[in-house]
Image (cartoon, coloured by chain):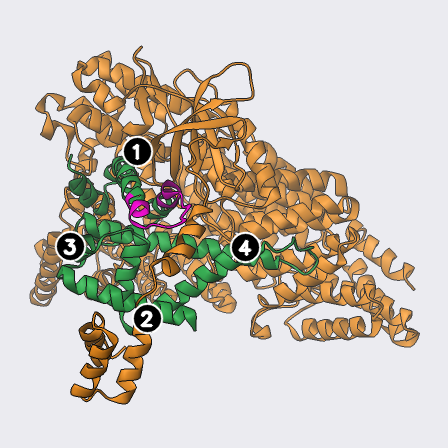
Amino acid sequence: MSPDVERIFDEVADLSAEERARYFSEHAVDARVRREVESLLLHDAGSSARILAPIATLAGSLGADRVGRRCGPYELKELIGRGGMGSVYRAERVDGEVRRSVAVKLMQGGSGDPVQRMRFLQERQILASLSHPNIAGLLDAGHSEDGQPYFVMELVEGKRIDEFCVDLPLRQSIALFLKVCDAVSFAHSRLVVHRDLKPSNILVTPGGEPKLLDFGIAKLLDLEANETMTIERAMTPAYGSPEQASGEAVTTATDTYSLGAVLYKILTGRPPHEEEGSTPAAMLTALLTKDVVRPSQAKPALAGDIDAIVMKALRKEPDKRYSSVDQLADDLRRYLESRPIRAREGESLYRIGKFMRRYWIPVTASLAAIVALTVGLLVIARERQIADRRFRLVRELAGNLFVIDDRIAPLPGSTDARRYIADTALRYLYNIGSEATEPDLMLEVADAYRRTADVLSRRGRPSLGLPKEAFQALENGDRLLERALAAHPKDQEILRAIVTNRMRAMSVLSHGDDSSKALEISGVLTKRVEQFSGGSLKIEDLLLVQSAYSSLGVAYLNGGRVEQARKYAELSVEFARLHAEGAKTPEANLAYGGALRIYGTFLRYDGQLEKSLEVLEKALRVVNPLPELRGKPGELGNVYYFLGIVNGEVDSLSLGRMEPAIEELEQSLAIGRRRIAEDPKDQDAKLDFAQTALKLGRILDLSDPARALSVYDEAYRTMSAAPAGAANRENYLVRLGAESTFSLRTLGRSLEAKRRMTTLAAFLPKNSKTESYGPTGSLESYYRAEAEMYVVAGDVAAAIKIYRGMLSAFAADKIAPREDLADALGLSLKQARLAQLLRKSGQDEEAGRLDAQRRELWTHWDQRLPNNTFVRRQVAEASRQN
Amino acid sequence: MEITDLLRRAHLGDGDALNSVIPLVYNELRRLASNYLRREQGPVTMQATALVHEAYLRIAGSPLPAYENRSHFYGIAARVMRQVLVDMARARSAEKRGPGLEVTLPDLDILGASTQNEFLALNDALDRLAALQPRKAHLIELRFFGGMTAEESAEALALPVHTVRRELRVAQAWLRRELAS
């Protein structure tokens, strides 16, 4: 439609046929343009129906408004509210005799997966038992006919808590709020986190009872989320927590924050972060970076305890808040009773941190000035006074820089600023350090190097991901420390710093997998840690020594020196035990359990399965009775996992005891499921879950293939839901998918098995060199499944070809079957299966050769580990198949 | 509070404002949709509420694009309605094909299938128009999916009313020709 066509169309559209013809000739309209205009005019006369009808008909078939429709036995009566995720209706139960009004919340989206539906229903039962006078009961939940999840709740008629409190005296408002705290605490004790507490979710009935709405919905919605669909979780910026804004772990501390925000609103009349007219992004940034204005600034009467209580609930760091809602409630009760509150303990420290947070830009600027100034001073003189001053400055720098870094690290796009901070620090430290002679100053500088290294690279924390630079910073620090140690050989402070530094260096190296360099450092670390532990130790030093030995154990194990690895793991256990006895805290006991668990797994690699089991059982006895604390579920899941695989992992170093293994792995799986439900962003929990599912599935496949299949499938869905590009996602998808084909075939669903294999091919690693054919590589699972598929289809030759390929690829990997028991088993299993297949196709000679190799390998191990149950079993097996 | 003010605040990320605006807008749109029916004569059996309701589920479930005033907001509604219908038509024709070869297909609903195909053909034609003349396609969208009058569209796009009328006319002719061929 050229401008010409359009213009002429406009001119002639309302003319008669003759007038148009005249127009065309008078204006000498180009023939092509004329044809175009005429053809458009031909379609000008029609009615709009040609366009409207298909739209209208289709729209009509959308079905009626939901009012009048049913969700299960409930008929929707009227729309009473809309939220970010769905609509709320007043509804009535129509199948029973009692006509009771309820609230039905109908969500968008939904999952068509029957397995997921079943879990949804199971979970619903748990939530339905969440019965508390101040929680609006979840009466029912299900899926509507078109698959949308819905929740049926007690219908609460009341006022929002903040509105209700407007006319209430302060003490009565707090008393009301305490009931809310009790309800939330009750739910927490049932492992249910609300995640979206806000005034509109807390209604007060005309009788003055608060009622919390929507408890448990977040949990059920998580079950709905799968790979094809994600339900966006509503987070209300005004009442949401910083960790929700930055996408970090959501825990009970999240509810504590939101409760603090609700209390803030009740007290002051506005939410803590009300940014009039700002964009969502600005609000989230404010949530992460800006300090909340103390309630007393809005209402001076609130100064003092109430200020402190609200501010403690609203701390940005979850672990700095009240450790539970009960503690928040406790402080509020103390306030009502005029007793001292906990929130004001350690206030001066708190104020300093707060200052740093508020003024990070001016602080950065003044640091730059300090750097320039101090470097200048250095050249001028070395008087004691100047040294003192330098000392003070470096301490300030070290402290401040990293407070700033902690603050800005979670902000999007902060990488450049952080890099700048780290570089400035490094330049500065280098200058100071090279001149330093006083041990205190050297220690300070070394510590600053270590912190800078943390900014550059730190496992499991937000860091700049620069391990080489981090290692260099640590080396610089280490040189200083060794120089200091040479002058003061028995100084515990210096030794402590060296041990810490060398441990970090090893951890940074293992990022880059430089195991020979790590072993070299191990030598130094061993010496220093022995010197250190020979001196007088404080309780927390025991933990440092313990982790040093534990890192040494790991380094030696990775370096293939099992003997030393075991020795250091033993030492690590010993120190962990001492520390736990001294410190008497649950955290210390958790660390002790962790050390035992690591030791147990080392024993397994060494073939000592019974002893490994013993140690792991001890770890279980240590960890299991601990109260809920951060890291406990993960550790407990680990312990159960290793117990399970030592007892019964198929085709691996295990005792072949399937029944206890199934029980333990099921435990581990259940823990993993809970961890994921509590924090869907926890990728480690997902990996643990998938790993457990793999092992459990293979055991179950022998006795209950249907259950095995459902385990594989659940883990497969969990991994698919992980973001594309997440570590090991594809690896697990292939392994879970490939293993599940064995169960499918046992269940007679070969066609599906075949189809799955085709899907999985897309996830195979592009470059086979990056993937091993060992037990953790996805190629192993995939090709084994493919080969067995050929065997079932009667094509033994094709299967033989695949096994041959796997065997030679495996052998080409750096394996040491005569040194490493796991390698021995990996090799032997492939040889055994290949030999079987060769016999099937009449190639007895080659099969015999393979069997002889296996017998020889296990005889070697039998001599190396005499009377070892596992090795004896392998020897027997290798001889039997002849 | 004035609805436009609520819209502005909702747009700025105020979740509470968004939640309180939706029942209001819902009613507003219900009215709009019934006008839409009244203005277009013919055997139209469309359920206005259902259409609007679906559209608003979509709007509330996804971040709101920038809009200046409430006409603009309706413009978004029109876009969303179109998307809802496209999704639905596509989903249905996919259903008819069946997810896998082993599934026995139900008998094709001849009438239903033809409506979906007609709709998808219209939608494709509208896409082609948008590639040539985006503003005309937008006007069609406002008119047929948003039920906006020429005056309302003119206000939303800050155009003279007669321009809107003119462009709608030629755009409709163009679309009808596309659909006839």
Chain under numbered label 3: B
The percent position of residue A112, horizontal first and vertical second, equals 56, 46
Residue under label 4, please give it.
B111
Residue under label 3, please give it.
B155
Q: Is residue A704 left or right of residue A479?
A: right
Residue name at image x 43 percent, y 46 percent: A60
Q: Are marks 4 and 1 on the same chain?
A: no
* Front tag of 3 and 2: 2
Residue under label 1, please give it.
A257
Using a 10 Å C-alpha cutoff, classify the residue at mark 4 as few (fewer than 14 neighbours), some (14 to 19) or many (20 or more): few
Q: Which chain is orange?
A: A
Q: Assign a secondary structure to mark 1.
A: helix
Closer to the N terminus: mark 3 or mark 2? Answer: 3
| Alpha carbon separation for disc pair 3 and 4 | 38 Å
Classify residue A339 by image quadrant: top left
Q: Assign a secondary structure to mark 3.
A: helix
* Front tag of 3 and 4: 4
Task: Assess whether mark 4 and mark 2 are in contact (beta carbons under 8 angstroms).
Answer: no
Is residue A178 at least partly visible in the picture?
A: yes
Classify residue A376 by image quadrant: bottom left
Residue A479, above or below B36: below
Foreground residue, A399 or A376?
Answer: A399
Q: Assign a secondary structure to mark 4.
A: helix
| Alpha carbon separation for disc pair 4 and 1 | 56 Å
Chain under numbered label 4: B
Task: Assess whether mark 4 and mark 3 are in contact (beta carbons under 8 angstroms).
Answer: no
